[in-house]
Amino acid sequence: MSLAVRVIPCLDVADGRVVKGVNFENLRDAGDPVALSKSYYEQGADELTFLDVTATTEERDTMYDVVRRTAEQVFVPLTVGGGVRSTTDVARLLASGADKIGVNSAAIARPPLIAEIADRFGAQVIVLSLDVKRAPGTASGFVVTTHGGRRLTELDALEWAAEAIGLGAGELLVNSIDADGTKAGYDLDLITAMRAISSVPVVASGGAGALRDFAPAVHAGADAVLAASVFHSGQLTIGEVKRELQDEGIEVRA
């Protein structure tokens, strides 16, 4: 849907530090979120995404201080998710410097939350964060999970995404729990399926492990490609990903 594909580093944050694991388990320290964010900004990141991966399970607020300090040094759109349960949470995050807000578990528990956020702040602010697992035998073959991928639901991922768009979600952040952290490539079937039902931008997440993984995700229907491990480890830079996409005939932002 976008004219130019966005490249977005994702910072999964727990206890004020960036963490990374495989399939959302065995989380290990990957650095300071503010320092990493500044580095990615200087590399040419189009946006940044912060996901507080333990905020919902620990029933605590998202780290407003980390968001504020990052926004003071990074001048690209910042999406923040994790522990968002109300329009009050959204207002506080926006005041701290966030540009877009990701919702997942709370929206599944109470879908009208999406409409409330969209009505108050605009659809462009709300990102539906989908942590998706393959589920053979279900209508689409995919279901959503909650609490940082720790709890399975019986909610069909495509049906839920379509419902959320109808309620006012302005973007879909589609993360494959099966591919997350594996570096085996994005789940192209999942991206294709989401693109087919979505009237809003689709951000592909989960599985990027090499330069060759990014272009197929775009060709499958992603408007943006999000990655974590390959950037945190220094294996790839934002510039390298953008050059690879350009070499594949995909327009990226300068």
Image (cartoon, grey):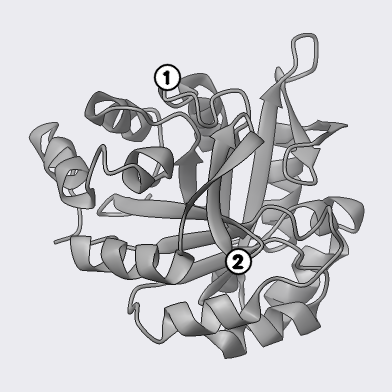
The image shows residue 213, relative to residue 47, as above or below, that is above
Residue at coordinates 81% horizontally, 57% vertically from top-left?
Answer: 56
* Amino acid type, label 2: Gly
Say which quarter of the image contains residue 177.
Answer: top right
The image shows residue 206, relative to residue 123, as above or below, that is above
* Amino acid type, label 1: Ala
Residue at coordinates 42% horizontally, 19% vertically from top-left?
Answer: 184
Q: Residue furthest bottom?
A: 95
- Earlier-in-chain disc, 2 versus 1: 2
- Residue 54 in percent (x, y) is at 74, 54
Residue 199 appears anywhere in the view: no
Residue at coordinates 9% horizontally, 34% vertically from top-left?
Answer: 247
- Residue 21 in percent (x, y) is at 57, 36
- Residue 92 in percent (x, y) is at 69, 86
Q: Which mark is residue 16?
A: 2
Residue 219 appears anywhere in the view: yes
Pointer 1 residue: 184
Give the secondary structure at mark 1: loop
